[in-house]
């Protein structure tokens, strides 16, 4: 079966966006962790 | 089938195009001045909080850029300089840009409030709202003073950086705000002089289009004077050391000389506007250098 070029392109773009979103979310989780640690250290929480 | 042909059937936007919505090149100056505001503040934030504050300023600027492109998509399509942006080039729907811009704006303000304080968050929100509603929607299509008043939006970052660190606003960050505010007109008018046909074709009432080349060149020179005064004021008022004072005086003198060369230039064709192009290029160096000197001065005095 010949792959539909539109579907292929849609999949490629969705994959790219999903990877960027996953990296962003992972970065956000790490950031929140360090914000929490910094606030606890600064304000003696 | 090429990507362009595929875009005609409205594919999901590429992440690179979503990133381009945030105007990363404009963001660099915003981030730098915000970082300088944070670094010269008398209170040292923990690294994670300082990093988050700068990230929020960057995200807020990106959100404002995305909303600007959402609103100006039709206008951008008319100008050579902007017609390859994701929206006018048809690589993204306007709804995607709107949702991304609003989402990023809300996220950046909330994160700033949670990580630092709500004064910094309020200033960030004010800068985004000012850029989108006052500059982009209200002033830009209506008046040649668009850059003069709209410049306030780009002047917020050092104020936000300072507020993030200290929780208040004092004379020094206000002077830095005023410096960028007064720097913006000569910076943009120098650009507008050699791309004025673009603005004219798009119906944007930039000063060179409405008032002509001579009046614009005179305004550039005139604005340079209060800008230089504002640049030197932190040193004159004893808020910084001599290192900053000397750097500000020297850089402002060069800026003024370049502005005078623009003033005496009679060229009407962009090809003959070398002084204008030099002033535009130097104006970017000027802001980076003067804020760099401010940080160096503050850190050497500590």
Image: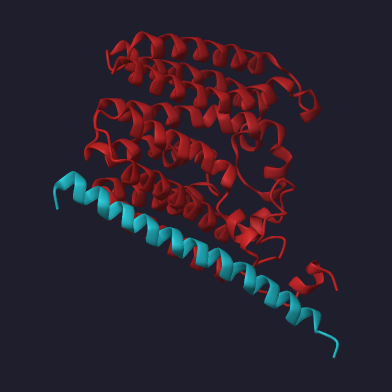
Chain colours: A cyan, B red
B298 in relation to B91, above or below: above
Where residue B57 appears, as percent x and y from the top left, is 41, 46
Where residue A35 appears, as percent x and y from the top left, is 30, 52
Give the mark count: 0
Horizontal side, residue A26 vs residue B300: left or right: right
For residue B66, which quarter of the picture? bottom right
Where residue B181 appears, as percent x and y from the top left, is 43, 32
In the rendered view of the protein, which quadrant contains the C terminus of chain B?
top left
* Residue farthest along the bottom direction in this orientation: A1
In the rendered view of the protein, which quadrant contains the N terminus of chain B?
bottom right
B246 in relation to B16, above or below: above
Horizontal side, residue B194 vs residue B229: left or right: right
On the question of residue B94 being in view, the answer is no
Which residue is located at x 67 percent, y 71 percent? A13
Horizontal side, residue A37 vs residue B145: left or right: left
Which residue is located at x 81 percent, y 84 percent? A3
Along the line of sight, which residue is nearer the eye, B152 or B170?
A: B170
For residue B111, which quarter of the picture? bottom left
A31 in relation to A8, above or below: above
On the question of residue B131 being in view, the answer is yes
Where residue A38 appears, as percent x and y from the top left, is 26, 48
Horizontal side, residue B237 vs residue A44: left or right: right
Which residue is located at x 27 percent, y 34 percent? B44
Which residue is located at x 27 percent, y 13 percent? B238
């Amino acid at each position: 079966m010949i792959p539909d070029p539109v579907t292929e392109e849609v999949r490629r773009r969705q994959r790219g966006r999903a990877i960027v979103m996953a990296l962003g979310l992972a970065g956000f989780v790490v950031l929140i962790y360090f914000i929490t640690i910094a606030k606890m250290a600064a304000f003696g929480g | 089938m090429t990507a362009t042909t595929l875009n005609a059937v409205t594919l999901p936007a590429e992440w690179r195009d979503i990133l381009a919505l945030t105007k990363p090149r404009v963001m660099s100056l915003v981030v730098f001045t915000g970082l300088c505001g944070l670094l010269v503040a008398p209170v040292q934030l923990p690294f994670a909080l300082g990093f988050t504050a700068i990230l929020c300023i960057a995200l807020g600027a990106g959100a404002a850029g995305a909303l600007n492109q959402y609103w100006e998509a039709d206008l951008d399509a008319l100008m050579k300089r902007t017609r390859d942006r994701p929206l006018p080039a048809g690589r993204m729907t306007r709804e995607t840009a709107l949702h991304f811009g609003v989402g990023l704006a809300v996220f950046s303000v909330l994160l700033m409030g949670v990580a630092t304080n709500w004064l910094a968050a309020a200033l960030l929100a004010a800068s985004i709202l000012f850029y989108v509603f006052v500059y982009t929607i209200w002033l830009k299509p209506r008046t040649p003073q668009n850059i003069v008043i709209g410049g306030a939006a780009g002047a917020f970052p050092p104020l936000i950086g300072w507020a993030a660190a200290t929780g208040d606003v004092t004379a020094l960050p206000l002077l830095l705000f005023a410096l960028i505010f007064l720097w913006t007109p000569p910076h943009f008018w120098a650009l507008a002089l050699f791309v004025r046909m673009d603005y004219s074709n798009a119906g944007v009432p930039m000063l060179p289009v409405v008032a002509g080349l001579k009046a614009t060149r005179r305004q550039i020179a005139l604005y340079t004077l209060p800008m230089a005064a504002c640049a030197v004021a932190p040193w004159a008022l004893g808020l910084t050391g001599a290192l900053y004072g000397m750097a500000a005086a020297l850089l402002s003198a060069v800026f003024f000389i370049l502005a005078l060369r623009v003033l005496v230039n009679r060229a009407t064709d962009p090809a003959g506007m070398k002084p204008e192009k030099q002033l535009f290029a130097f104006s970017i160096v000027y802001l980076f250098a003067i804020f760099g000197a401010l940080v160096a001065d503050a850190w050497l005095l500590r």
